[in-house]
Image (cartoon, helix red, strand yellow):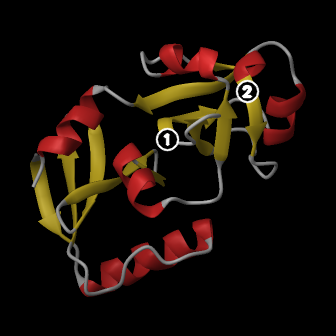
Amino acid sequence: MRKRHRLKNKEIKVFLNELKTKFDTDFFDTDSSIEIGNLDQFKVILVNDEIDFMIIEGDIVFTLHGLYKYNPKRGFVIVDMGAVGFVTKGADIMAPGIIDADANIQKNDYVWVCDEKNRKPLAIGMALMTGEEMKSKKSGKAIKNIHYVGDKLWNLSSQVA
């Protein structure tokens, strides 16, 4: 990991406030060790030596490891089991494979994708349509896949500490 440094308490409070505003919940406290660094093409945020968030174009976004750890209730998209194999190979998510989605999702929001059976996070992506459109449309690309189970960030996240 390059350019890794620990955030100061003031920076941690700003980060916590941004997360609280975005997700309506607290994920950790100011006593946690928060670091920021670059891991390949990703700018990542480590909480107690675990890669829980990444920064994409100024937005704080969960990593899959962060989703497993914090289990947020917003920004979800549920796909049928037929889509799982494609999603975990990096394919974008098509509207016909979507079973349900958070109705509050707006176009260009970062969302997380899970399967209908286990409800385990499979991917992080950018919404190309609203949550309501995802549920009702029968064709078209709904989500651009950014980070998925088995990709480089997933594998690197397991090795960092």
Q: Does the rendering let one see residue 39?
A: no
Residue 79: where, in percent of width, then height? 66, 28
Measure the alpha-carbon separation of dots 1 and 2.
14 Å
First in sequence: mark 1 vs mark 2: 2
Quadrant housing residue 74: bottom right
**Residue in front for this viewpoint, 114 or 19:** 114
Residue 23 coordinates in the image, percent (x, y): 59, 67
Residue drawn at point x = 25 percent, y = 79 percent: 32
Amino acid type of the residue that numbered disc 2 sits on in the rendered structure: Ile
- Residue, x 12% and y 48% (percent of image)? 160
Q: Residue at x 22, y 33 (%)?
A: 155
Residue receiving disc 1: 121
Return the x and y of residue 31 as percentages of the image width and height: 25, 87
Q: Is residue 13 left or right of residue 33?
A: right
Q: Which of the labelled discs sits on residue 98, or is there none?
A: 2
The amino acid marked with disc number 1 is Pro
Residue 100 relative to residue 55: left or right: right
